[in-house]
């Protein structure tokens, strides 16, 4: 049961994200990070990208997908409660990720919002509702996998994803860019949680 459940949940998440990224990026220039890599590495860019981009992402993908891999090898389920909790976390996470993405896309489509900060909807309660949602999705998938016998050690997956989102390629990287590009962002930071949703703080 957990095998089919994980396959369905992961597929729904992946299809939603693929459609979102395709709609956002088709026809757009190459990601600025890859452009910077081209300038830095020059003729060595193909090899550098093979190691730094594809090799590293492959290793991360292996670690993050451990709950799904292990569930395919283990056929015995021992905890229905863990599976139910996992589906609940996944659902809340998908809500935050998809609604947060949709609200940001709608905000950016309005030319009057150029240089401004989105602080309504889910973005009123957390500065990164989409990253928070993505994090919950992977914790949810872990708890579903943990309903299988002996799969608790795959907690490495959500721990890795949480660390990456908070400290590497997610919140910390994006926050640096936004602080420098949006004058209103400092005030937004002072009143809004970075990751976990919470009631906005009042400025004294």
Image (spheres, rainbow, N blue to C red):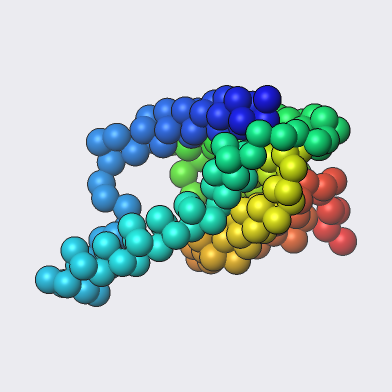
- Residue at 74% over, 61% down: 190
Q: Quadrant of the N terminus?
A: top right
- Residue at 27% over, 62% down: 50
Q: Viewer-proximal residue, 70 or 93?
A: 70
Residue 56 left/right relative to 41:
right
Please state the horizontal and vertical placement of residue 60, each as a whole percent of the image. 48, 58
- Residue at 83% over, 58% down: 203
Please state the horizontal and vertical placement of residue 86, each as a whole percent of the image. 75, 36
Q: Viewer-proximal residue, 62 or 202?
A: 62
Q: Viewer-proximal residue, 191 or 112?
A: 191
Looking at the rendering, which quadrant does residue 137 occupy?
top right
Q: Quadrant of the C terminus?
A: bottom right
Residue 108 visible:
yes
Number of callouts? 0
Please state the horizontal and vertical placement of residue 54, each as a whole percent of the image. 33, 57
- Residue at 61% over, 30% down: 3
Residue 28 left/right relative to 60:
left
Seen in the picture, residue 175 relative to 112 is either above or below; the reply is below
Residue 117 visible:
no
């Amino acid at each position: 049961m957990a095998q089919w459940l994980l396959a369905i949940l992961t597929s729904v998440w992946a299809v939603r994200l693929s459609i979102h990224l395709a709609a956002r990026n088709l026809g757009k220039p190459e990601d600025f990070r890859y452009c910077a890599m081209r300038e830095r590495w020059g003729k060595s860019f193909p090899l550098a990208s093979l190691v730094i981009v594809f090799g590293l992402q492959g290793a991360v993908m292996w670690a993050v997908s451990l709950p799904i891999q292990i569930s395919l090898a283990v056929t015995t389920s021992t905890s229905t409660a863990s599976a139910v909790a996992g589906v609940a976390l996944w659902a809340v996470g998908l809500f935050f990720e998809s609604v947060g993405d949709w609200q940001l896309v709608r905000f950016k489509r309005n030319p009057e919002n150029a240089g401004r900060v989105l602080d309504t909807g889910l973005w009123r309660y957390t500065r990164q509702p989409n990253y928070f949602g993505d994090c919950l999705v992977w914790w949810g998938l872990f708890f579903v996998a943990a309903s299988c016998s002996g799969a608790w050690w795959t907690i490495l997956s959500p721990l890795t994803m949480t660390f990456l989102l908070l400290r590497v390629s997610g919140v910390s990287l994006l926050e640096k860019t936004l602080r420098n590009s949006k004058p209103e962002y400092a005030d937004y930071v002072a009143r809004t949680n970075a990751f976990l949703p919470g009631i906005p703080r009042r400025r004294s």
